[in-house]
Image: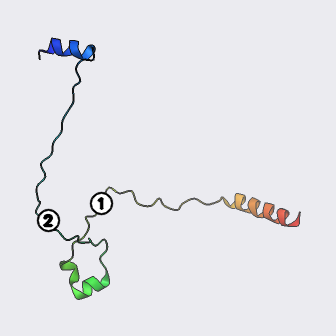
Amino acid sequence: LPERDRTDLKRRKLLLEVTLKSYWIRKGSAFSTAVARQETELTPEMIATGSWQQRPFKPYNFSALGLPPACGHLHPLLKVRSQLRQIFLEMG
C-alpha cells in the first residue's frame, strides 16, 4: 500500500501493523545433551589432583556489584548516651 493510504487506514483503525520477529536456532560448539554443572570456585583439592583442567568453570562477572560493605558505627558520645538510656530503663 502507498504510505498515504496506509496512514489513512491506520487512522480509521482498519489497518493494524504487526511486527514479526523470527530466530534461527542452531547447535553451537558447546552443544551437549547432558547437563554439565559448571564449577564456581577453584578448591585446593582440584589443584592437588589436577582435576580443574578438565572441569568447566562459570565465567567470572567483573561487572557484579557484590555485597555492600558493613560500615558505619555509633559515635563514641552517642554510644555512651545509648548505654545511659539502657541503664535508666533497667532501673526505672
Along the horizontal axis of the image, is 37 left or right of 31?
right
Percent across and percent down for residue 10 are 24, 17
Q: Residues within 10 Å of mark 1 (few under 14, many from 20)?
A: few
Q: Quadrant of the C terminus?
A: bottom right
**Mark in the foreground, 1 or 2:** 2
Residue 80 quadrant? bottom right
Q: CA distance from mark 1 to mark 2?
A: 20 Å
Q: Which is more toward the observer, 33 or 50?
A: 33
Q: In terms of sequence position, does the residue under pointer 1 or pointer 2 come before the other?
A: 2
Task: Look at the numbered disc 2 and give the secondary structure of its residue.
Answer: loop
- Across and down, in percent, residue 58 comes to 26, 67
Residue at the (54%, 60%) spot, across then down? 71
Q: Which residue is painted at 11% across and 17% down in the image? A: 1
The amino acid marked with disc number 1 is Asn
Residue under the image location 32 percent in, 55 percent down = 63
Q: Quadrant of residue 39?
A: bottom left
Task: Check disc 2 and report the residue beneath it.
Answer: 30
What element does badge 1 sit on? loop
Q: Is residue 45 above or below residue 86?
A: below
Q: Is residue 84 depicted above or below 52 in this figure?
A: above
Which is more toward the observer, 13 or 38? 13
Q: Identify the residue at the far bottom of this view.
A: 49
User: Residue 76 — which label?
Assistant: none
Sort mark 2 into few (<14), some (14-19) or many (20+) by Cα contacts within 10 Å. few
Compared to residue 4, the image places residue 66 above or below, namely: below
User: Can you identify the residue that label 1 sits on?
Assistant: 61
Circle 2: residue type: Ala
Q: Residue at x 18, y 78 (%)?
A: 54
In front of the other: 55 or 43: 55
Residue 55's x, y, as percent? 21, 76
Q: Which residue is more in the foreground, 12 or 36? A: 12
**Horizontal relation, residue 90 to residue 45: left or right:** right
